[in-house]
Image (cartoon, helix red, strand yellow):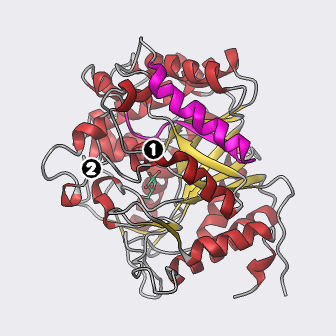
C-alpha cells in the first residue's frame, strides 16, 4: 500500500476572500467597492444576494480563527479589502479598516497559524472604478501605493504576500463577459484590463522589494485543456484555450511576452505594448499560488466569442454543482506543467475545492458531504504525487473555510468545509472538515485509506 507523508514545513491551510465572508462592507470608515455596487444592480446576482452580512466574519473573526485552530490549520489565506484601508482607493489611509487586518493577523499568530495575505481579490474601490478602474494606466501606481501601505504596516507579521488573485477571472468575468464586477462586456477592454493588472502586479512586486523582507508572489487559476478529439481544429482550439487561461498571465511574468495566440484571439483588439511594460511585469517573484478546480476537454466552437472554444462534457466524469469536471489528475498535471514550463519555483495550491449539495444538519449534529470529502481525498493524493514528481510544493489551501457568497451565484453554491447557517450564523464542521483535520493531524497518512 502507498504511504503518504508531506514535508515537515508543509503548510495546511484554508482560504477565503474579504467580500465573500466579511460583511459590514462600510464599517469603520470603509469605502464602497465595485462589488458593493454590483450586488445593488437588479438582476446581476442570484436571488438579489449581497455581501452586506455574508458570514459576518468582520464581527466573528476571533471565533473563526478558533475554528481554524480546532481544524489544526497551520496557514490561513485571506484577502484585504482595498477600500477598507483606502476608502477612496488612494490617498487617505483609514485606520479603522486597517485595524481589522492587524487584529486578524495578530489573532492568527497567537494561534500559531501563518497568515497568507492577498492584496486584491476582486473588490476594487468604487472610487477608482469611477476613474476607469483596471482600464486606467494609473491603476498600477494606485495599487502599488496601497500595497506599500500594507507592507509597511504588516510585513513584520505577514511573511507571504500575493498581489492579485486570478487576473484571468478579473478580466474574463469583469471586462469581457460581464458576469462579475464591474460587469463590462467589451472585447477591446479585456486586453487592456489584463495588461494593467499585470503592470499593477509588477509595480506591487517592485514596491515589495523596497520595503518587504519576506516573499511576494501571484495567484493564478489554471486548468489543463485537453482536445476533445484529434481533429486539427479541436487541437488548435485547445491551444487557444490554454493560452487564454493558463499562459496569458504567467508567460509575461516568467518569459517577458504574451502567448502568440492572444493576437489570434483578440485580433484588432489586441494592442502593442511598450517594451518597458514587459520589463516591469517580469519581476522576480518568490512563489506562484495555483487555484485549481477542474480540467476542460475542448472543441472548436465558431460562435463562442472571442476564443471560439467550448467545453465538452465527459459522460464518465463527476461534475460539481457549478458544472465543473472533477479530475484530480489534472492538479498533478498542472503543477508539473508549471514547473516544466517556468522553472522549479516554490508553489502553493492557494485554492482547491468543490460546491456540492449539502444535506441539512442531521440530528446528531453532522453535515455529511461525501462527494466533497472524496474530492479532497483525491486532490490531496494528487498534490502528493506532484511532490513525488519533483514539484517544490510548499502548502495547500482548501477553498473554502466557510460557505460564503459565491459572487454572482450568491449563496446558492456552498464551497465550505464548514457549513454556515446564514439565518443564525451558526458554523458546523462538515464531514470534509473532519477529514481534512485528520489529514493534517496525520501529516497525510490517512490518505491511504478509502
Ligand atoms: C475564486 C473564489 C471563488 C472560487 C469558486 C475562485 O475562482 O478565487 O473567489 O469563490 O473560485 O468559484
Q: Position of residue 314 (x, y in %)?
A: 43, 81
419 vs 8, left or right, is left
Label ID, residue 50: 2
Hey, which quadrant is residue 150 in on the image?
top right
Question: Ligand 1 appears in which quadrant?
Answer: bottom left
Q: Can you see residue 328?
A: no
Q: Which residues are magenta?
A: 94-123
Compared with residue 410, is residue 264 higher up or lower down, i.e. above or below? above
Q: Which residue is mark 1?
A: 59
**Relative side of 48 to 429, left or right:** left
The numbered dot on residue 293 is none
Question: Would residue 42 appear left or right of 389 to someone viewing this image?
Answer: left
Residue sitting at x 46%, y 74%: 325
Q: Residue furthest left?
A: 42
Q: Residue at 53% of width from left, 67% of height from top?
A: 417
| Along the line of sight, the residue nearer the viewer: 216 or 33 | 33
Amino acid at each position: 500500500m502507498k504511504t503518504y507523508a508531506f514535508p515537515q514545513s508543509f503548510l495546511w491551510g484554508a482560504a477565503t476572500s474579504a467580500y465573500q465572508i466579511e460583511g459590514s462592507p462600510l464599517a469603520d470608515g470603509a469605502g464602497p467597492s465595485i462589488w458593493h455596487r454590483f450586488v445593488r444592480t437588479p438582476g446581476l446576482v442570484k436571488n438579489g444576494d449581497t455581501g452586506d452580512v455574508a458570514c459576518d466574519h468582520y464581527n466573528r473573526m476571533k471565533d473563526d480563527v478558533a475554528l481554524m485552530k480546532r481544524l489544526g490549520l497551520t496557514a490561513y489565506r485571506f484577502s484585504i479589502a482595498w477600500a477598507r484601508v483606502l476608502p477612496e482607493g488612494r490617498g487617505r489611509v483609514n485606520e479603522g479598516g486597517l485595524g481589522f487586518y492587524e487584529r486578524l493577523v495578530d489573532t492568527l499568530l497567537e494561534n500559531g497559524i501563518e497568515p497568507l495575505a492577498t492584496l486584491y481579490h476582486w473588490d476594487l474601490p468604487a472610487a477608482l472604478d469611477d476613474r476607469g478602474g483596471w482600464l486606467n494606466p494609473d491603476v498600477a501606481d494606485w495599487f502599488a501605493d496601497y500595497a506599500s501601505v500594507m507592507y509597511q504596516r504588516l510585513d513584520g507579521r505577514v511573511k507571504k504576500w500575493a498581489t492579485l488573485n486570478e487576473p484571468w477571472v478579473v478580466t474574463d468575468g469583469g471586462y469581457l463577459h460581464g458576469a462579475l464586477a464591474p460587469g463590462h462586456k467589451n472585447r477591446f477592454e479585456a486586453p487592456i484590463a489584463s495588461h494593467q493588472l499585470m503592470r499593477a502586479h509588477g509595480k506591487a512586486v517592485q514596491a515589495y522589494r523596497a520595503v518587504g523582507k519576506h516573499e511576494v508572489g501571484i495567484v493564478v487559476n489554471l486548468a489543463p485543456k485537453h482536445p476533445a478529439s484529434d481533429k486539427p481544429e479541436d487541437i488548435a482550439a485547445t491551444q487557444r484555450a490554454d493560452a487564454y487561461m493558463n499562459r496569458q498571465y504567467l508567460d509575461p511574468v516568467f518569459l517577458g511576452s504574451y502567448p502568440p495566440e492572444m493576437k489570434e484571439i483578440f485580433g484588432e483588439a489586441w494592442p502593442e505594448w511598450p517594451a518597458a511594460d514587459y520589463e516591469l511585469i517580469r519581476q522576480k517573484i518568490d512563489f506562484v499560488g495555483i487555484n485549481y478546480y477542474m480540467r476542460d476537454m475542448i472543441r472548436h466552437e465558431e460562435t463562442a466569442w472571442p476564443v471560439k472554444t467550448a467545453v465538452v462534457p465527459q459522460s464518465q466524469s463527476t461534475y460539481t454543482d457549478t458544472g465543473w469536471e472533477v479530475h484530480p489528475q489534472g492538479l498533478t498535471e498542472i503543477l508539473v506543467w508549471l514547473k516544466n514550463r517556468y522553472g522549479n519555483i516554490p508553489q502553493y495550491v492557494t485554492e482547491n475545492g468543490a460546491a456540492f449539495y449539502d444535506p441539512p444538519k442531521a440530528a446528531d449534529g453532522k453535515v455529511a458531504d461525501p462527494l466533497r470529502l472524496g474530492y479532497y481525498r483525491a486532490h490531496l493524493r494528487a498534490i502528493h504525487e506532484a511532490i513525488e514528481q519533483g514539484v517544490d510544493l510548499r502548502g495547500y489551501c482548501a477553498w473554502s473555510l466557510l460557505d460564503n457568497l459565491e459572487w454572482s451565484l450568491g449563496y446558492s453554491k456552498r464551497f465550505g468545509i464548514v457549513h454556515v447557517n446564514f439565518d443564525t450564523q451558526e458554523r458546523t464542521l462538515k464531514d470534509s472538515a473532519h477529514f481534512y483535520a485528520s489529514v493534517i493531524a496525520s501529516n497525510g497518512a490517512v490518505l491511504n485509506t478509502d
